[in-house]
Image (tube, coloured by chain):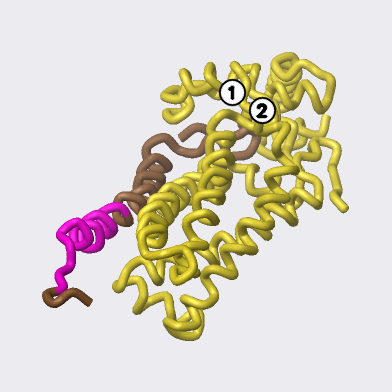
Amino acid sequence: LPSNPQIPVSYTVWKRVAKPLALLMGLLAAPVAFFHYVTEGPKEPQPPVRDREMPR
Amino acid sequence: MTLVRGDELLRHPVYSRVVHWSVAIFFLLALLTGLAIYSPWLYRWITPLFGGGPMTRLLHPWFSIVFVAIFALQFLNWLAPMSWTPDDRRWLRGLRAYVVNEEALAPEYVGFFNAGQKLYFWAIAISAIVFLLSGIPMWFPATFGRVAAAIGYVLHDVAAIVMLVGFIVHFYEGTAAQPGTFQSMTRGTVERRWAWTHHPAWYREATGRDPRADYDSFVRRMFRSSSTDDAHQRTSAIND
């Protein structure tokens, strides 16, 4: 080891900032999908034949 | 064996379904063990599921190797229908309309897979290569050196995030967003209505019939049989 070992700033930024932020942004896809479902609804086969398939 | 009823079409034969679910299982195992190593916060929650930290670390590369191997089979199985065509660029230009459900029926040129599904497939293919090439130096840092392992960590994490987003979107599209799609990967079949709605060019190829003409004829039959506004009669129109 060097006499005065130091952790590079780039590594700290990567581990403490970039990685958690990237994970959070990735997981954001789940609430976005939920929001899409609530606002746009499912894409039912056409024409709708069952009651649950009728446009809301 | 796949049982195809009168109002259905065979979408995914047994081999495709077995390969798909094998890929899915090992992808999830690799994802979970990978996420446990990715973040100290997730480490606390996930590692007990796999027998502790060292066991999770040990299992992750093996789950991943199996995932890549089975995905190679899926790659070969779906290479032809996943090939990119000029129609896929047209589909991407209409992406906004697709996302906001602007059109009830997909454009007539959409075949067995749409461009969104193809993009996900190719993202997995590229990510699987990145996982493999970056994961091996991480697995054996003494052999490949510190620099290769460090670059590997960055590439591995970027590919993992891309796959995580892709998986969430894929799961949503395959279940809640498009009713009937999940059945194609369980029973292997889809309703004809599903086929002419989402993949009209494949419907034409599979049946030799015009998807729009069949849709119009179905609507006319449904109108006749729904004069009493009875949901049961509307459903029975499928089997006419």
Instruction: Verify whether residue A21 appears in magenta.
Output: yes
Q: Colour of chain A?
A: brown
Instruction: Verify whether residue B40 appears in magenta.
Output: no
Q: Secondary structure at mark 1?
A: loop
Horizontal side of residue A56 vs B67, given as left or right: left
| Position above or below: B218 against B183 | above
Instruction: Identify which residue is drawn at 41% across, 66% down.
Output: B35
Residue B88: % across, % down: 57, 22
Residue that mark 1 sits on: B106
Horizontal side of residue A23 vs B99, given as left or right: left
Instruction: Give the chain letter at badge 2.
Output: B
Residue that mark 2 sits on: B199
Instruction: Identify which residue is drawn at 77% across, 16% down.
Output: B210
Find the magenta span and give its range.
Answer: A5-22
In front of the other: B230 or A3: A3
Residue type at mark 2: give it: His
Which chain comes out yellow in the rendered image? B
